[in-house]
Amino acid sequence: MKHLDCTLRDGGYYNNWNFSEALIAQYITAMQAAGIQTIELGLRSLKNSSFSGACAYTTDAFLSTLDLPPSMTIGVMVNGSELVGKNAGQQALQLLFPSPASESPVDLVRIACHVHEFAEALPAASWLKEQGYDVGFNLMQIANCSESEIKALAKLANNYPLDVLYFADSMGSMSPDEAAQIIQWLRSEWQGALGIHTHDNLGLALSNTLRAMDEGVTWVDSTVTGMGRGPGNARTEELAIEIAARTGKPANLIPLMTLLREHFKPMQVKYGWGTNPYYYLAGKYGIHPTYIQEMLGDSRFGEEDILAVIEYLRNEGGKKFSVHTLDAARHFYRGAPTGQWAPQDLFAGQDVLLLGTGPGVAAHRQALEHFIRQHKPVVMALNTQSSIAAELIDVRVACHPVRLLADCEAHIELPQPLITPYSMLPMDVQGALANKNVLDFGLNVQPDNFTFEDTHCTIPTSLVVAYAMAAASSGKAKRILMAGFDGYPGEDPRNADTNKLLRQYQDTPSSTPLLCLTPTRYDISCQSIYGPLK
């Protein structure tokens, strides 16, 4: 059994492979004490378009500065994409590995490639073996391949000098039975050593690894605390315990536990790897975990946004990460907008009081209710805002499909009509709102664009505040009075995003003037609800 720890390689997707010298030294000591035979200390790459730490390149020069135990196998990984296509072959390999294994600290080279890259990348194994390196190949995203495709891949591997053939549960979607099935298919054509690299979307990384061991897999991967792309991997501290129990060779875990406490647990708090319901859904639907990782690290994505993107990718496909796909998924209203209701019927010539969801509404409730009774504005509440007496709210507005679906029971119970792009909503959302009095106002999302038409609008984002302001402007409202738009504390980037949106709106011809009546951090005109309005 070969236990390979790849923390400094897979974990680098969170910190740009910028691990401190002190951490690396302590890590090597902990791995040796825990009985880990092989450590993969990073990637080896020719790409250099932004700053990454030493473990993104793991050069011989860098490795030579480390105190590497002679008894441990030292590995690096190469992305197969750097060995195929225009710059493929021996030229790239010579740049990546300028010295033979006899003159290098590296013993093992693993090549990670997608199934469609496998045939073109395999010749690299022959060149690396000639240089004296042990060679492994990691097949990524194999879960969706058919039996015949997997067997063909395994058969192809027989033509090259591989020391181990790995398969990776790239999406974290496998069950133990599915892992066992893939092993059986691979084994029917490949008699060499097999390895498995698991991801923990479904919380099954360790279970899948143990089942693979039961099925005869002899190379297994893990990382400290599971640190790795997206939800992470099987945890080294747990797998080491299981292997020790199976082999009868006790492992000294004290240095590893110290490493966890001093370095990896604080990093986990900072970067937030580990499975959660979002990663679980991504694993369940075969969505690349980087989508979740990117959204969790971006404050612009709220809970409903993340769930909406997951649903979009579930239907449209998200096996390969793309920034452009993520942007398209976030702004899901595309194409010609359709609507049946004209806001002028409600708003023309009227002050509109827009109730946001910030604490300012509840904090100044009495003053707001007095203002409403005295001045009689048309009161429009975002989503299910209920801090004001229900009889004083004239209409509600919502446009986010996930939020609408989550709130549909509440909307059914609430007495006010609902402004929403009903005819453009997914069928499940339409069905949930079938018994609701809806005012069908269409919308289209186009960056940096506000337009106000009789029965629809174009807005730069699917945020409900943009939709509400557009509805008021389409309705020829006299003024938009705002309450509960407190903003976010400190340097939260959402303040800048909202300010940009508000500026775009106010710079649009025919937009309706804005005036905030409760405290706000946004760059908009403000007067006090307690004083006379100008």
Image (cartoon, rainbow, N blue to C red):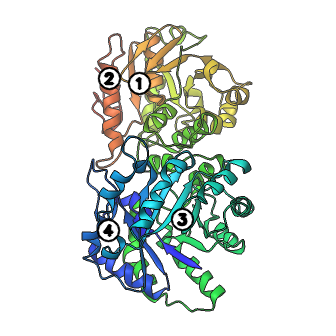
Of residues 395 and 447, which is closer to you in this image? 447
Q: Residue at x 52, y 78 (%)?
A: 237
Cβ atoms under marks 4 and 1 closer than 8 Å: no
Label 2 and label 3: CA atoms lie apart by 58 Å
Front position in the image: 181 or 160: 160
Question: Which numbered disc, 1 or 3, marks the residue that appears first in the sequence?
Answer: 3
Which image quadrant is residue 13 in?
bottom left
N-terminal of the pair, mark 1 or mark 2, is: 1
State the SS at label 3. loop
Q: What number is the disc on residue 504?
A: 2
Return the residue at label 3: 162
Q: Which residue is mark 4?
A: 19
Check disc 4 and report its element: helix, strand or loop: loop
Q: Do residues under tags 2 and 3 come within 8 Å of each other at their CB atoms? A: no
Which type of secondary structure does the marked residue at label 1 adopt? loop
Relative horizontal placement of residue 251, taking residue 32 as reference (left or right): right
Residue type of the residue flagged with mark 3: Leu
Horizontally, residue 331 falls left or right of residue 411, namely left
The answer to whether residue 200 of the structure is visible from this angle is no
Mark-to-mark CA distance, 1 and 2: 9 Å
Mark 2 vs mark 3: in front:
3
Label 3 to label 4: alpha-carbon separation: 30 Å
Q: From the viewer's perspective, is the residue at label 1 or at label 3 nearer?
A: 3
Residue hosting label 1? 460
Q: Nearer the viewer, residue 349 or 46?
A: 46
Q: On the picture, is 526 further left or further right than 439?
A: left
Q: Local crowd at mark 4 within 10 Å, few (<14), some, or many (≥20)?
A: some
